[in-house]
Amino acid sequence: MTKTCKILVVSIVIYSVISGLVSAEAIVENVYVNPENPTKLSDVTITTSFAGINESDNITLYIKECDENTGLCDQPFSMLMTGTNSNNFSADFSLEFETATYFDYWFVVERNGGTTDIKDDSYNVQMASSSGDDNDPQNGGDSKGVPGLEMTIFLVAIFIGLIYLRKRDRK
């Protein structure tokens, strides 16, 4: 290999490494929601860590509260997250949508160069029942132990099967 060829190959490798470092994409490493399943109208803290973040980058948290029963969602709101150390960020907020059963949240990374790196990943947090009755389906619970429509259909099918067998045995 000639000297010019070696210089060209080394230059290409160095350029690739430097351009990769400069345009590194921000990646969400860990996300913690406290409490894990908040109740309606409660205070929540979201803490996250990123890879590929510079000190000059701003992280904005977007939150959208929704009611699973009606399909309605409150207007999303946003807040600038506070850096707790080099790659960790935190935000405290209060849930405000009275009928919300869950909320979605996502992050937007604003780069120093004016570009915005939008995180396409949206996270979902189910809310705990605030009434204390976890078996009430109206509060997102499950009516455990109470036969529903499927049990009724099952019993009717057995009854029809027994009638069919009795008629068949009489013939």
Image (spheres, rainbow, N blue to C red):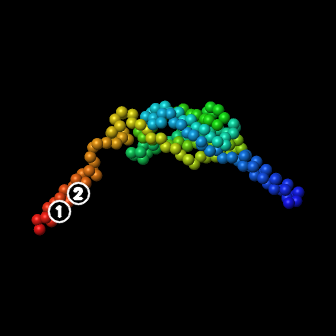
Q: Would residue 75 be seen by someone viewing this image from the given angle?
A: no
- Name the amino acid type tagged 1: Tyr
Location of residue 169 with respect to 31 vertically, above or below: below
* Residue receiving disc 1: 164
* Residue receiving disc 2: 157
Q: Residue at image x 58%, y 34%? A: 90
Q: Is residue 11 rendered to the left or right of residue 123?
A: right
Image coords of residue 160 (percent x, y): 19, 59
- Quadrant containing the C terminus in the rendered view: bottom left
Q: Residue at image x 23%, y 57%? A: 157
Q: Residue at image x 73%, y 46%? A: 22
Q: Would residue 73 be seen by someone viewing this image from the given angle?
A: yes
- Quadrant containing the N terminus in the rendered view: bottom right
Image coords of residue 147 (percent x, y): 26, 46
Q: Quadrant of residue 69?
A: top left
Q: Residue at image x 69%, y 46%? A: 24
Q: Residue furthest right?
A: 3
- Name the amino acid type tagged 2: Ala
- 135 or 58: nearer the viewer: 135
Query: Marks 1 and 2: CB-CB under 8 Å?
Result: no
Q: Residue furthest bottom?
A: 171
- 103 or 11: nearer the viewer: 11
- Indicate which disc, 1 or 2, sits on the residue closer to the N terminus: 2
